[in-house]
Image: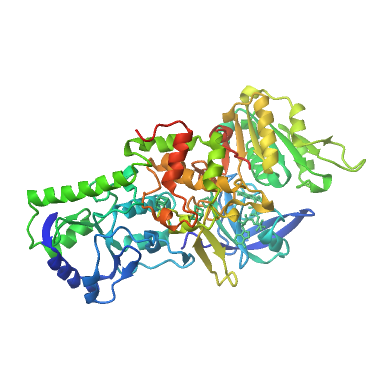
Amino acid sequence: MKIHINYKEFIDKLKEMFDKGDWISCSNSHFFKLQSINDFDKVELTTIRPTEPIKIFLFQYRSNIIENIKKNKTLFLLGVKNCDLQAIKVLDKMFISEYIDENYKNLRESIIIFSSDCPKPNQTCFCAILNSKPYIDNESYSTDINISFIDEKNLILESFSEKGEEILKNYFSNFAQPTKTDFEKRDSIRDFALKKILEFNNEFLKEEKKEKYYKTLKNTYELDNVWQKESEKCVQCGGCNFICPSCYCFLIREYSKSYNEKNRDRVWDVCHFTGYSRVAGGANPRKYKYQRFRNRYQCKFVYRYENFNFYACTGCGRCIEVCPAKIDIRKVIRNLLLAKGEEILV
Amino acid sequence: MSTYKPKNFKILKIIEETPNIKTFTLKPLDETKFNFHTGQFIELTVYGIGEAPFTPSSSPYETETIDLTIMRVGRMTEVLHSMKEGDIVGVRGPYGKGYPVEEFKNKEVLIIGGGVGLAPLRSLILTLIERISEFKKIILCYGARTPQDVVYKYIFPKWKKIKGLEILRSVDRCQVDEWDETIGVVTCLLDKINVDVKNTVAIVCGPPIMMKFTTLKLVEKKFKPQQIYLSMERNMSCGLGKCGHCQIGSYFICKDGPVFSWEQLKDIPEPFE
Ligand SMILES: Cc1cc2nc3c(=O)[nH]c(=O)nc-3n(C[C@H](O)[C@H](O)[C@H](O)COP(=O)(O)OP(=O)(O)OC[C@H]3O[C@@H](n4cnc5c(N)ncnc54)[C@H](O)[C@@H]3O)c2cc1C
Ligand code: SF4
Ligand code: SF4
Ligand code: FES
């Protein structure tokens, strides 16, 4: 179902839904919880993804894994961008395929997503040269309703799931269908954003090279010296892992008081840390910094690509912004491609 | 129940194998049966201390209890070694894929173990013994550092009597008159055996360095990569293919292993360390 609505009417309708669950809105730094109906007036839908990674809603930094999280009330996420949908795709693959992680599953099932197009990408955004575009279409992963601005005051709402369809039917059925002109406006805003991203990344990578990342990163063991050079400034702080929406690694900490008072936590872990891969007796298959640094890239661009057939990096650029050593994932990949003799800037 | 919540098991019996290896016999507190496939592993919890992966060393045909043979190497195993019969520990699992026993049928099965690496292999050998007529022959090559470090000393006399099971043992070093079998690293036993390489599978478990040199030696002896099976060890946390720790190339050792054929691993850089 697709409808045309003006922004004010849209927000008023959301206000009617306030008590249907908890509401989280995106800004360009944080996800904010809406405290009252009036907070809907502060909602921002056109910023880029928050700096905070979306995984906090599915798999918190520290969580108890002995007690099952009960099905809680619905969590509405408002303004989720396509790169973060892509991150959820990776997390779903890890947590609810094969063995099911019940806590993840319960949280996942309680979420309803109102995604929105991303008309103003940042210099650090590179979604469009990987898996996704700066807007939501049929190729996007699992949203319920998408919001596209078509001018300052008007939107197109589009449902992508049964839940989304139901919401549109229940709350928005009085509104008109979008016209051909509405879609044309939407397309031109989308095209503009897409072009911006390709332009920002021109010096790094080109979209048509994307399957080359896998091939190049897979066999870079003869390029140890390049990895060493690229990782030289890395201080192994783990910031890139923590901030990354698709980094899912965790560690189980055992705190039980006794066998009948069990207690254990799951905390985010970091493949850059030496203890991550160290085994008993002190042996470590990734002893050197460059091996751990390389692992993070290969995990996303080689191993998960082999498992899932898509890259486990979303191109959100969070790790670029956070790195104290100013390491830019795009430059690292570019330099590897160059060292492999690939033509990049054609 | 949470996937990560261990079940309580009671320590029924503790055998001191060597100065730093003990075998613990565990039984579920709720008296349920514990089924596993030989070569699969479990996650063992010492409550309040930590959790670590171990492969049962007992026969999967024994479902009342499980044996774990554990070397004291660090934080959690240190505390475990100080525990007594009657104490309670936690177990979750079994996890992973075990030995593909069906594929060994009508073949010569060459089993090579080093140190505490004999633990999973004992489970495998006990499984093979149950159906010994299905295999051409079974050869066990076992190496330990010194005669004191040999595990399951009490089992070998029994095993040596079994028709179809051939046993060769070595120690790296020993005192005069202390050992009347081979002296040298375990790979030198491979020069003493007589197998029809084309119809043999080799199964290896031991410390990383031993696995590496044994694999190289087997390859030199013209074993094909798909005829060599290795029990891999990596840092593990979840045991379920989620936490990332045990990743080796695009495999997770906990979920896709811990038993791998050399064919699966040979192109992955630094598989041993
Ligand atoms: C599939 C598999 C099967 C195995 N089977 C056997 C077997 O049958 N017998 C056997 O003896 N060994 C076996 N091992 C090895 C065994 O798991 C290790 O010896 C064991 O993990 C050692 O634990 P430890 O705490 O005593 O050692 P440590 O060296 O103290 O710790 C080992 C690892 O645990 C983590 N760790 C340590 N301390 C902490 C802490 N405070 N908080 C969080 N993490 C911590 C670290 O990441 C470290 O790399 C097996 C390993 C695998 C992967
Ligand atoms: S690796 Fe960087 S750009 Fe890729 S998903 Fe993670 S934080 Fe975003
Ligand atoms: S954020 Fe930068 S310095 Fe920190 S671990 Fe990542 S690459 Fe290294
Ligand atoms: S131990 Fe967690 S992924 Fe294998």
Residue farthest toward the right in the current orientation of the protein: B176
The image shows residue A249 at horizontal and vertical percentages of: 48, 55
Please, is residue B20 above or below residue A307 in the view? below
Is there any visible trace of residue B137 in the rendered image?
A: no
Q: What residue is shown at x 18% (from left), y 62% (from top)?
A: A167
Is there any visible trace of residue A225 in the rendered image?
A: yes
Does residue B12 appear to the left or right of A188 in the view shown? right
Color encoding of the figure: rainbow
Q: What residue is shown at x 76% (from left), y 45% (from top)?
A: B155
Please, is residue A188 above or below residue A73 in the view? above
Q: What residue is shown at x 35% (from left), y 54% (from top)?
A: A88
| In-front residue for pair B253/B90 | B253
Does residue A53 appear to the left or right of B59 in the view shown? left
The image shows residue A157 at horizontal and vertical percentages of: 16, 57
Quarter of the figure that contains the C terminus of chain A: top left
| In-front residue for pair A228/B9 | A228
